[in-house]
Image (cartoon, rainbow, N blue to C red):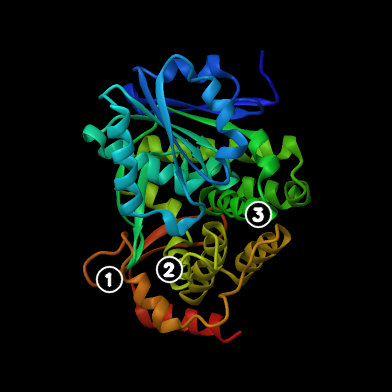
Amino acid sequence: MNNPDFQTITVALGQRSYPVWIGAGLLADHARWRVMLRGRHAMVISNTTVAPLYLERVATGLEGLHWSSFLLDDGEAHKTFANVGRALEALGQLGATRDACVIALGGGVVGDLAGFSAACWMRGIDFIQMPTTLLAMVDSSVGGKTGVNLPVGKNLAGAFHQPRAVVADLDTLTTLPAREYRAGLAEVVKGAAIGDEPFFGWLEQHADALAARDAGTVLEAIARKVRYKAGVVARDETEQGERALLNLGHTFGHALETAGHYTTLLHGEGVAIGMLLAAQLSERLGMSSSADTSRLRQLLEKLGLPTSIPAGMDAQQLLALMRLDKKNTAGSLRLILWRGIGRAEIVGGVAEAQVLATLDEATTH
């Protein structure tokens, strides 16, 4: 019998397929996720904000194992090689063997760093994602992208390393600050904007309920976004083609985050502004209409997301940061643009003058 308050979505990757469980009370549902741990060792990587709230629920399910916890300070600025090194040292102190499991309990920063640490330890051990933010539930916990930031740019070091399972406990959203929750909604909008116009219309109709965190609406939005992403990942695991579309708004957004030293904007806020810039550039290039740009802006604003470049950011600096994006090819910007809602595409050889004009216009308004 289907449970309207619980969803299981499978990321289909052959022998490496894994479930994404979405529902309330899942961290304490030890019988469900404990069987995914194959060895005697486990390490929970979390942060100083999340661990006091939820580590105990996970710890109860680890009874009988040799396990430890490793806590990061909270924030994007701590997603560094130095902290990966400390996590690996902690795995060494635990005596973690090749059948050990890393558990990522937190948001995207924790998930990315924990996954990268798991990918590095003994050339790759299991890890389980337990995302505690909306953004991590709908995006970073699914698909196996792991990594850390460098001073010159975001996520420039990393590895594809798929989790054994994703445990998205909706109860954790009750302690999520309003700004963090809204930032997660940007990634929900992104999935619809890329390839699902009916979902975009659904979001427009349910924007008020989403903003108010109505439980049933939130579950449906998460499930629809995860189902869409799982399909893309199954078809293009290592981003050779279609998966690059999931980066709509990210080239602009990562530049904005980096320019703000990862403190001015949350990732989802950068993506929201970046999506709108991508829509404006698409419109400038004659690919899409102003009506599509307006619909996107209105939905983002209705969900409480920013749509303007923060004051003090310079168009030339942002363009320089965009040149470091991983999607670029030799000497040429390669961006995810669209031909309207639900019709994103990869566009190579984008003229820097057009990008600069878009940024100039956005930074002067």
Mark 3 vs mark 1: in front? 3
The answer to whether the residues at label 2 and label 3 have Cβ atoms under 8 Å apart is no
Query: Mark 1 Cα within 10 Å, few/some/many (few <14, many 20+)?
Result: some
Q: Earlier in the sequence, mark 3 or mark 1?
A: 3
The secondary structure type at the circle numbered 1 is loop
The secondary structure type at the circle numbered 3 is helix
The answer to whether any part of residue 260 appears in the image is yes
Q: Which mark is residue 258?
A: 2
- Residue 60 location (% of width, % of height): 55, 21
Q: Earlier in the sequence, mark 2 or mark 1?
A: 2
Distance Cα–Cα, label 2 vs label 3 = 20 Å
Q: Which mark is residue 332?
A: 1
Q: Residue at x 48, y 62 (%)?
A: 249
Q: Which mark is residue 223?
A: none
Q: Which mark is residue 182?
A: 3
Distance Cα–Cα, label 2 vs label 1 = 20 Å
- Residue 194 location (% of width, % of height): 51, 53
Amino acid beneath label 1: Ser
How many dots with numbers?
3
Mark 2 vs mark 3: in front? 2
